Image (cartoon, rainbow, N blue to C red):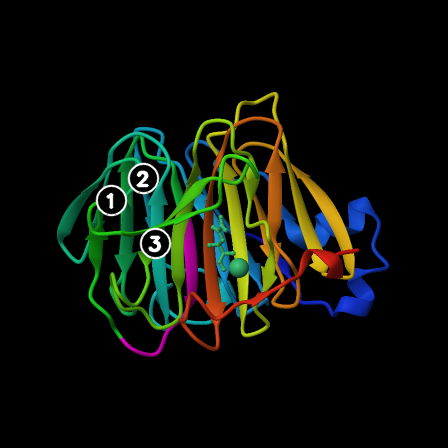
Amino acid sequence: MQISETRYAIDPPTAKTLDTEGLRKHFHVDGLFAAGEIKLVYSHYDRMIVGSAVPDGKTLTLDHDDATGTVGFLDRRELGILNIGEDADISVQGTSYRVAKGEVLYVGKGAGPVEMSGHGRFYLLSTPAHHAYPTKLITLKDARRVEMGSRETANERVIIQFLHPEVHETCQLLMGYTQFSAGSVWNTMPCHVHDRRMEAYLYYDLDADQRVFHFMGKPDETRHIVMANEEAVISPPWSIHSGVGTGSYTFCWAMAGDNVDFTDMDMVPMEALR
Ligand SMILES: O=C[C@H](O)[C@@H](O)CC(=O)C(=O)O
Ligand SMILES: [Zn+2]
């Protein structure tokens, strides 16, 4: 068993009654990246599974979990793996891929067991899939880059898109990560919602003594969750998802839902925020 937890979906009226601990129980994910283990959290928001695998010099195999009710984990799912650690190997269907830090391996539906080894720190994202797209290593030069923000508003950053229809087709998983220019600390502000898709963020490359204040909630009912390095947060479709760091960081974003149109967002005017 690798599923350490199941998280059910809740509605905005319930969410707004939660205190800090309640918010964290529903949306904040810690305890990932344990050495020598695969850790998975099954979210009922679009049934996205968020997890990690840290082989710690050995080999870890993702093959079956009772939570999916299928023989093989990928029988009816697709998987995106981002390596945030050292260059390491992943083997799928007899092919071995050398995955460098900052690269993404897409593994298609029905690909069978996934063997991860070496000193990688693998962030795992999996969503239901009903078509088999090819397994592919996506490098930085394959990815799309979208520059956003400015120095003056402390949000100068580049959104690097790996699982995106123009880079590699998937059933519903969209993913990539965002890096900042020195001194910029605000992500996804001005903020947005997209009721058609949920989202999950992993904050990483953050110094151990620094934090990111992650904002969530309906635009007129915001809350915050304090995030440490290598912690993830689930963003319901109706919620904003934006953060500000006390130090520099990178974050991986991933979405699933009704469409794969990255730009299908409803921007929130600043004056609407409460
Ligand atoms: O729907 C898209 C996602 O929220 C992120 O890609 C936003 C992001 O990376 C950013 O603005 O820095
Ligand atoms: Zn978003």
The span shown in magenta is: 124-131
- Hey, what amino acid is under mark 1? Leu
Compute the Cα span from label 1 to label 2. Answer: 7 Å
List x then y, in percent, for residue 32.
52, 40
Compute the Cα span from label 3 to label 2. Answer: 11 Å
Label 3: which secondary element = strand
List x then y, in percent, for residue 171.
35, 73
- Hey, what amino acid is under mark 3? Gln
Q: Mark 1 and mark 2 in contact? Answer it, CB < 8 Å.
A: yes
Residue at disc 3, CB closer than 8 Å to ligand 1: yes
Q: Which mark is residue 140?
A: 1
Q: Is residue 94 magenta?
A: no
Few, some or many residues within 10 Å of mark 3 (<14, 14–19, 20+):
many
Q: Which residue is rendered at x = 47% and y = 71% of the image?
A: 69
Q: Does residue 1 appear in this view?
A: no
Position of the C terminus by quadrant: bottom right
Q: Earlier in the sequence, mark 3 or mark 2?
A: 2
List x then y, in percent, for residue 77.
37, 68
Q: Earlier in the sequence, mark 1 or mark 2?
A: 2
For the residue pair 236 and 121, the one nearer the viewer reads as: 236
- Hey, what amino acid is under mark 2? Gly
Q: Which residue has dot 3 on it?
A: 161
State how many labels appear: 3
Label 2: which secondary element = loop
**Residue 11, relative to residue 212: is it above or below?**
below
Compute the Cα span from label 3 to label 1. Answer: 9 Å
**Residue 127, relative to residue 188: is it above or below?**
below
Label 1: which secondary element = loop
Q: Residue furthest left?
A: 95
For the residue pair 131 and 38, the one nearer the viewer reads as: 131
